[in-house]
Amino acid sequence: MRLLKIVPDHTNIDFVSLRGWAFGLTLLLSILAVGLTGVKGLNFGVDFAGGLMIEEKFPTPPDQDKVRTVVDNLGVGDAALQQFGDPRTLVIRLPVQDGADEGATNAVVKKVETALGQGFPGATFSRYSTVSSKVSGELIRNGVLAVVLAVLGIGLFAIVRFEWQFGVSTIVAIVHDLLMTVGFFALSQFEFDLNIVAAVLTIIGYSINDKIVIDDRIRENMRRYRKMEMREIVNLSVNETLPRTVMTSVTILLALVAMLALGGHVLRGFTAAMILGIVVGTYSSIYVSSSLLITLGLRAEPDTTERPDRRSMDNAERVAPRER
């Protein structure tokens, strides 16, 4: 039986020739992501914003103004409403004072549940969660610290494992992936909570795995073809690892699409972040990180004492000729 091949054998795509467009697109998307985050902000969940979150499901799409009026009349604080998942489900956010015990929180939840049940017959309570302002501040600090340390640690590893150009290109690509994810959440206003931080760290792990494989092949080919132009080495290395990159991305996306379709609204934000991260991470590995090595001045050291064998020359013929 013939094996399925998404990428044909002896693929010879000149990725480096598109690096100018790739760098421009990367810069544009990064600026847009930062702008969206600054203008619209993130829809922080209770984990980061603090307070009480109550999820209520109604038999038909409710009038949000009426729901807000019912809740505000209870004297439990100003309510913020957001549609969650389908139009019949609302998330109600209420402020919670620091030090409020579980009994007081349960009383507020019961009060809201009873009032909504009377005002909207058939409405059902789904779940609630609460976080104090002190804890939410600690969660924000720890989440940002975890992401920053992960990026710096990965860059340091790439510098020690390869050369400084590899570390810089890896950090640039990962920061691009993170900005795209944050910009997506600013645009979509999906809830940004600890689950999304976990998704971001997972995206970083996938991105570095893909980039290290390509970087390792580039370094191998730099030793093998010491007289070859760096442009041709990068093209050859990316083409050689392309089948693995595409197959890995496709298989992961199949699982994520199934989670997005069947996992329900609780996993929707996490899954959407993962899908975007896989697509953007694959793009940055192929078009940004690898080509950036040339811009940073990475060169294969010439060696006149060694001559490539027949197999090396055959492989070298697969590289697209350098543009003149």
Image (cartoon, grey):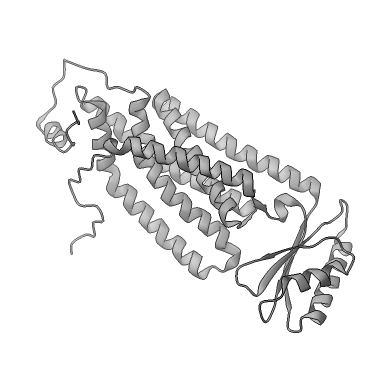
In the image, residue 283 sits, relative to residue 301, either above or below, namely below
The residue located at (51%, 39%) in the rendering is 31
User: Is 55 placed left or right of 157 in the picture?
Assistant: right
Based on the displayed image, in which of its 4 quarters is residue 265 positioned?
bottom right
Q: Nearer the viewer, residue 319 or 82?
A: 82
Point out the residue furthest to the left here.
310
Quarter the N terminus occupies: bottom left
Vertical relation: 39 (above or below) 111: above
Question: Residue visible at 30% across and 38% down?
Answer: 18
56 left or right, relative to 227: right
Residue 51, x across and y down, in percent: 79, 56
- As displayed, is residue 75 above or below residue 40? below
Q: Position of residue 147 (x, y in %)?
A: 58, 40
- Asked which quadrant contains residue 211, the reply is top left
Q: Position of residue 202 (x, y in %)?
A: 51, 48
Direction from residue 172 to residue 11 in the image, left or right: left
Q: Nearer the viewer, residue 182 or 237?
A: 182
Position of the C terminus by quadrant: top left
Q: Is residue 215 visible?
A: no
Task: Report the residue that reaches farthest toward the top.
Answer: 304
Q: Residue at x 57, y 43 (%)?
A: 35
